[in-house]
Amino acid sequence: MILRTFGWSFAITALGLVAAFFYGGLAGFALVAVLAILEISLSFDNAVVNAKVLDRMSPFWQKIFLTIGIAIAVFGMRLVFPLLIVVITAGLGPIEAFDLALNDPDKYHAAMESAYPTIAAFGGMFLMMLFLNFVFEDHAHKWLPWLERPLARIGKLEQLAVVVAGGSLALVAGLWAKDPGDVMIAGVLGMVTYILVNGLGELFSGAGEIGDDEDEDGEDGAEGEVAIPARKGPSDLALATGKAGFFLFLYLEVLDASFSFDGVIGAFAISTDPIVIALGLGIGAMYIRSLTVFLVRKGTLHEYVYLEHGAHWAIGALATCMLISIAHHVPEWITGGLGAGLIIAAFASSVIRNRSTGEGDAGSGDGEGKPLHSTKV
């Protein structure tokens, strides 16, 4: 199963490292390897949340995410996106920006840095909304009950996530930002993007798409798939096809973009060469996709019930770091360390819980031959 799931990632890693060696010698080889590790460490929580959403998508949209989605993540966000930022902020044409990236990486880096506050505001608020909508919802399992119970109680107040996120954005823009107007606009757009994509996914999953499948294929839907009512967060949407699947796919791509912002900017602390950065982060993005598939096929989130909680708390930590970084640099090791530490702690808590309740064996299965889509509800 490991080879089947991670085979493409292993192949891309080999090709990428060979290309890095011919492009930049041993130094290029080492830099690409370090960048790949950096991307994986910063985005592991992304894989956990991706798996939760992917588990609710139809097989067709899962394949779209794992094919077209990979191309968007690897080439779009890790190569084209930084160039697009320079095109917009520096007023250059695409060819000029690419020439600048190859021949004057320091100036290219400076252009990226000048745009970072607005990038961090957009990505930070998108991730903050995701985090807040999760912690303000009442969940059957509670990893940190002393904290999650009171948060779930106050979460009954409508639109509390918008209030908290909007207040945080106003505080950061007012106290720290050099250009408060740009930061506020970018942050609000991040919130609007989350609300729009999340709302459209819920709308179509609850009003027609899955219902149509049930009418055509029987009470439980096609191939025994059981539809469930949509809940608050996009991570809990019912198995989705058609328009619902499209908006979940769109949601996952925006989520990946929000995670990649920090990685792309942070990569310049290791190398200013855009080719090296694209190779390293591209390899890391491939492993995040493969890890997402692995989590779905193994049913890991069903077996280790606190893992999703740890991922969302890691997302909250990342969102906070991105907002702080609008005015103060936050080292990548802090961002990656917080995320990895929270997920490891959640995994360990899940293992302890399973041993104490005897539920571990029941939830795991062998994972072999399991279809990518899940029918667990």
Image (cartoon, grey):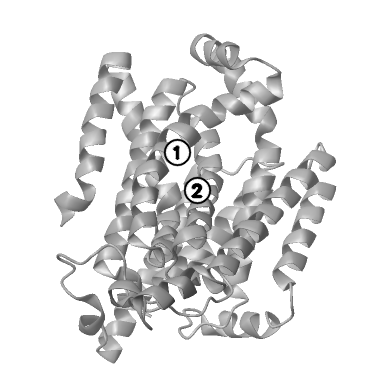
Q: Position of residue 9 (x, y in %)?
A: 26, 42
Residue denoted by label 2: 253
**Residue at image coords 36%, 27%:** 31
Q: Residue furthest front?
A: 216
* In front of the other: 20 or 95: 95
Residue 308 appears in which quarter of the rendering?
Answer: bottom left
Q: Answer left or right for 274 relative to 201.
A: left
Locate residue 21, reporting x and y percent: 26, 19
- How many dots with numbers? 2
Question: Is 150 drawn above or below residue 49 in the view shown?
Answer: below
Report whether 282 appears left or right of 118: left
Q: Residue at x 25, y 67 (%)?
A: 298
**Disc 2 secondary structure class:** helix
Assign the N terminus to one quadrant of the image. Answer: bottom left
Q: Which residue is mark 1?
A: 72
Q: Amino acid at mark 1?
A: Ile
Which kind of residue does numbered mark 2 sit on? Answer: Glu
